[in-house]
Amino acid sequence: MAGYEAIKQRFADAGGTVYAAAVDSAEKANEVRADVSFPLAINVTKAQSDEVRAWWNGDRNYMQPAEFIINADGLILSATYSTGPIGRLDAEDAVTMAPLLGPGGLS
C-alpha cells in the first residue's frame, strides 16, 4: 500500500481519493495504518468480497486484492482482480487514469 500512499496526492489533485480494505483484524491493520494516511477498512468478510466479485481463498480465509478506479459519475474505469501475489495494479499505473476521475471522465 506504500505505492498508493506515494501517489495519493496526485489522485487528490484530480478530485479522487484512495481507500483500502483488508481482511485483517484491527491489531494487524494498525501495523498497515502506520505507513498510510488514507482510509483503511478492516475485517472484510467473504460476503463483502463476493459483492465485488473478488477471489476468496477458502483454505486460508482471506480475499485476494482487487483494485477499482471509479470516476465521479460512479463509472468503473478499471477493475483488477488478483488470484495470487502477481497481477496487482501498480499505483503508478493507476494514477495515469487520474485525469479521467472527474464528472464525465471516460463516460
Image (spheres, rainbow, N blue to C red):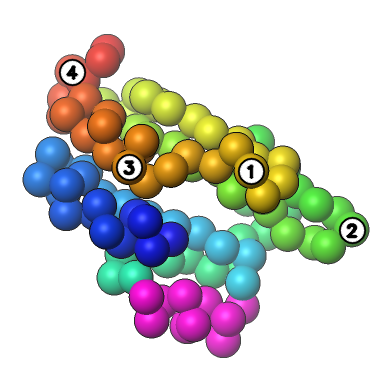
34 on left or right of 30: left
Query: Which circle's residue, 4 or 3, is located before the other in the chain?
Result: 3
Residue 42, located in which quarter of the rendered image?
bottom right
Q: Main secondary structure of the magenta part?
A: helix
Does the magenta portion include 24? Answer: no
Residue type, mark 4 in image = Gly
Highlighted magenta segment, given as a residue range? 25-35
Name the residue rendered at 25%, 52% in the picture. 7
Query: x, y percentage for residue 101?
Result: 22, 31
Residue type, mark 2 in image = Asp
Name the residue rendered at 27%, 13% in the picture. 107
Query: x, y percentage for residue 76?
Result: 40, 26
For disc 2, the marked residue is 59
Query: Which circle's residue, 1 or 2, is located before the other in the chain?
Result: 2
Does the magenta portion include 30? Answer: yes
Name the outermost residue toward the top: 107
Query: x, y percentage for residue 36?
Result: 34, 70
Secondary structure beneath disc 2?
A: loop
Query: Which circle's residue, 1 or 4, is located before the other in the chain?
Result: 1
Say if residue 76 shows up in the picture: yes
